[in-house]
Image (cartoon, rainbow, N blue to C red):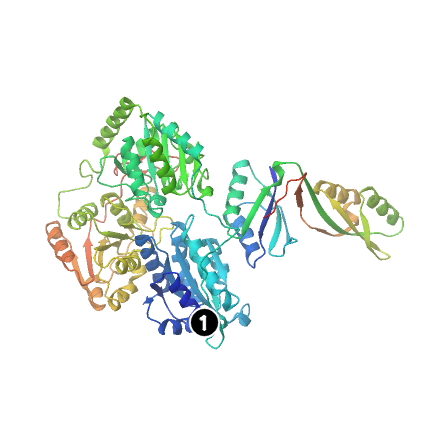
Amino acid sequence: MRRIVSVLMENEPGALSRVVGLFSQRGYNIESLTVAPTEDPTLSRLTLVTIGDDHKIEQVTKNLNKLIDVVKLVDLTEGSHIERELLLVKVRATGAQRDEVKRSVDIFRGQIVDVTSNMYTVQVAGTGEKLDAFLQALGEHTIMEVVRSGVSGIARGEKVLSV
Amino acid sequence: MELLSGGDMLVRALQDEGVDLIFGYPGGSALHIYDAIFRQKKMKHVLVRHEQGATHAADGYARSTGKAGVVLVTSGPGATNAITGIATAYMDSIPMVVISGQVPSDKIGEDAFQETDMVGCSRPIVKHSFLVKNAEEIPTVVKKAFYIANTGRPGPVVIDIPKDVTNPADRFPYRYPEKLRMRSYTPAGKGHTGQIRKAIALLLSAKRPVIYAGGGVVQGDGSGLLTELAQRLNFPVTNTLMGLGAYPGSDRRFLGMLGMHGTFEANTAMHHADVILAVGARFDDRVTNTPGKFCPGAKIIHIDVDPASISKTIVADVPIVGTVKSVLGDMVEMLKGTDEQPDQSAIVDWWRQIDDWRERHGIYAAPRYRTDGDMLMPQEVIRAVHEITEGDAFVTSDVGQHQMFAAQYYLFDKPRRWINSGGLGTMGFGLPAALGVKIAHPDTDVVCVTGEGSIQMCIQELSTATQYHLPVKILCLNNQALGMVKQWQEMQYEGRLSHSVYEESLPDFVKLAEAYGHLGMKIEHRDELHGKLREAFAIKDRTVFIDVYVDPSEHVYPMQVMPNGSMRDMWLSKTERT
């Protein structure tokens, strides 16, 4: 089962390596990982997507909580939540293809953020599924380079993860 | 406010933390710190012969006193040599603070001379680590390090300090923090009352209960309460390898150790139990054998200070997170406050069953080793030492057959007396650990039970014993082979003894001991065992190396059947199986 674990941790050198190290050390999977400081510069927010059964996820969260740098964490997939990922993709676009690509970008509510006579750089945000669908719509042969940010997530409603 | 250099700050902070003893080895990156140590008198420093020895000595000190052991090493090889000892402490949850020198800040990452990423190297085997960036941080970092090492589930903490940070030319105001608040670290305290109430109800309903107590009871100073609880309920108790001494070994309710080399009665009682109270134990693979076949009819209550230990391998029916002392204290109080009793007739039947198991295959009912012939058996050597030391010595051990014989036959009545590397299984642990214990307990007998294999892994520490006059007894059960490896090869590899025998290459340990300024003694025959051991233990002011030649063909039994065995599937001798 796919889980999104959101972690609030001390913004200290070495903190991230402890999280990543824990996963490799204990044989847990990391599907994606994003991290950046929060509005409080002493804290970082890390969103991690992992796959495992309930028992594994329980161990993951317990062991993350054991890390001294981890202040709080929540398994977002336990409740209703919003998840977003950012995609940047360079697409080959010449001749008739240029309109075709532009139409796809509009359908997926993306933006063209850079352009040359031969290509577009497109930005799309959404769930992982939506980004997969967009890439599929573009077709393999038009894609030159793909960058994905990994998932960020937040709980719906008034629930917050804070100190 | 007083102005101090980083080196002086470190030394002062350690003193302010109450540290009076450190084990270490100097080197380039640690020299400013060593100079600060030279210029003070409050804290004693013990110079070991190898950094691994420093960590094991600090570990022995910590296990025997309950206070964090402190180690100081230099960068690079000094730091990496400490790794095995840090991992040993980590696996057994021993409080330790390891301070390592580091190359100057501006050289970090340049592959400087004696540079190692110590924080990176030690990351998977520490509870936490710090890289000190500014001297001003030192007092707070030291305070945090000891707080983290000592509280919750204890463990080693590394403080890595670049050389420029301890520079005597740069001085800063010093103040040791009185209080500490860490928003990201709140160790467990009291257990949940509702859960404890559930546990009591389950215990009172038990017909075939077993208390399974681990190292957490020793480390968490819960032995007194555990004993009170077990005696109040009249329940049988088994201890893990790490938990020996948590419950008095000479009490009739004690079933012996459980697990791979546990007693028949302990393993069989566990298998048939209907309620298991696990306290400060972590269902290690050396205890459970095949997890899928573990104690099929048992409801499990699990008390642990570390939530991650609960339901890790075996799911707990009643999990209780809290310190052993607090939870057991609450349980005893709750029992005192109720008129309810366990079903007495069921408990009587259960004891009758256990006594029958004891009688049939127990290792304490009758000797299960050869008692005829001239060849000494390792079990009787341990028994003789137990008798001569009146069961009250500190016993450190290395790793292998001798360790299991000591665990089985030296019945510990007190916690913190049995000091061994249970989790990591570190050969070379015994001698330096014994030195650490002896410094803390100069008036008590300290015996290092070892083998001719293990002792050679840290034998250089004989020189430390000489320098600091640490008169320990080294009991070497010499079978001229890596006994446990050989046992497995004989049982599982059709006797192909691949690189497990020493042939004629062993040193003369008597002469070796003498070369270091100690006494050496050799025991080869049964009729001289007691006399010579008494002679050795009567010597209180010298280290004595007692080299005892034992039957090299002897195996450790019981031994659980692997793979795919349950708790109760055991070899009882070379030919008998349950």
- Residue shown at 14% from the left, 42% from the top: B371
From the viewer's side, name the closer residue of A138 and B493: A138
Report x, y in % for residue B198: 42, 30
Q: Which residue is mark 1?
A: B2
Report x, y in % for residue B246: 30, 43
Counting labels gives 1
Report x, y in % for residue B206: 34, 26
Farthest residue in the top direction?
B345
- Residue shown at 68% from the left, 38% from the top: A157
Report x, y in % for residue B479: 23, 52
Instruction: Tell me the quarter of the picture where residue B222 sits.
Output: top left
The quadrant of the image that shows the C terminus of chain B is top left
From the viewer's side, name the closer residue of B367 and B542: B542
Image check: B395 left or right of B133? left
From the viewer's side, name the closer residue of B375 and B45: B45
Instruction: Tell me the quarter of the picture where residue B243 sits.
Output: top left
- Residue shown at 23% from the left, 44% from the top: B411
| Residue A68 visible somewhere in the drawing | yes
From the viewer's side, name the closer residue of B255 and B383: B255
Image check: A65 left or right of B38? right
- Residue shown at 60% from the left, 54% from the top: A43
Disc 1: CA contacts within 10 A as few (<14), some (14-19) or many (>=20): few
Task: Classify B532 as above or below A83.
Answer: below
| Residue B568 visible somewhere in the drawing | no
Q: Secondary structure at mark 1?
A: loop
- The chain carrying label 1 is B
Image check: B326 left or right of B441? right
